[in-house]
Amino acid sequence: MSEEQHDTNVRIDNPADFPPQEDTVERLWTPQRMTYVLRNADDRPTRPKTRECPFCAGPRKSDEDGLIAWRGTHVFAIMNLYPYNVGHLMVCPYRHVGFITELDDAELFEFEKATTLAMKVMEEVSHPDGYNIGINQGEVAGAGVAAHLHQHVVPRWNGDANFMPIVAQTRTMPILLSDQRAAYAGAFARLAPDFGLPLK
Ligand SMILES: [Zn+2]
């Protein structure tokens, strides 16, 4: 920082004071794309609706057919048909909304509370070493079903990210989804009352 900046309240950082961080990521600077980023929300492209929303259809089926592990008052837990890892569960509101900002307080509370319950369920069923939890909101952010909010809860074990996904574009899935659902459903039923969460 130069001397003359010290007597003002405005901090002006000189890029030259910050040597570039070494990493392996190439960056392509494309300021012209701000046109897309800043354009009117009404102009955003939407995928044509060709089939019913799976997160609206799921709860209308039986637990077994819909791969539902738990049903609460405002949200439910459903197995992911295309799991990132064994035991990949999703917590969804019953209501067809795309963004977490659209949930009311009761929904939001149960959405997050059920996410922590899902971790406890996984702990009991399969003893993970860690978890990936997160929401992709909007197609641009990677949401597969962008129109219906869903929180991913993915159990992780030391050594699970082996060479298979990299070499073969394949994940090893040693447990059937139906068996995993049944194991989760049992643990949800046992643990939900301690979390102050309902069972339906
Ligand atoms: Zn839906």
Image (tube, helix red, strand yellow):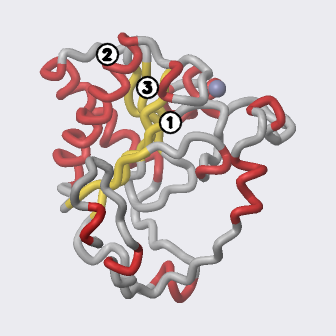
Q: Secondary structure at mark 2?
A: loop
Residue drawn at point x = 56 percent, y = 85 percent: 168
User: Could you say which is closer to the camera, residue 176 or residue 119?
Assistant: 119
Residue on which disc 1 sits = 150
Circle 1 residues within 10 Å: few <14, some 14–19, many ≥20: many
* Ligand 1 quadrant in view: top right
Q: Which mark is residue 76?
A: 3
Amino acid type for the residue under numbered disc 2: Leu
Residue at point 32% right, 73% down?
160
Report, in whole angstroms, how far the alpha carbon at label 1 lies from the one at label 2.
Answer: 19 Å
Q: Earlier in the sequence, mark 1 or mark 3?
A: 3
- Number of numbered discs on residues: 3
Residue 101 is situated, as x and y percent measured from the top left of the image, at 49, 24
Image quadrant for the N terminus?
bottom left
Q: Amino acid at mark 3?
A: Phe
Residue 10: x %, y % from top left: 32, 50
Q: Which residue is mark 2?
A: 199
Give the left or right position of residue 137, taking residue 189 as reference: right
User: Residue 98: percent from the left, percent from the top?
Assistant: 60, 29
58 vs 198, left or right, is: right
Q: Nearer the viewer, residue 58 or 154?
A: 154
Residue sitting at x 49%, y 56%: 83
Q: Relative to residue 156, is residue 25 depicted above or below?
A: below
Classify residue 107 by image quadrant. Answer: top left
Marks 2 and 3, how far apart at CA = 10 Å
Image: 159 above or below 119: below
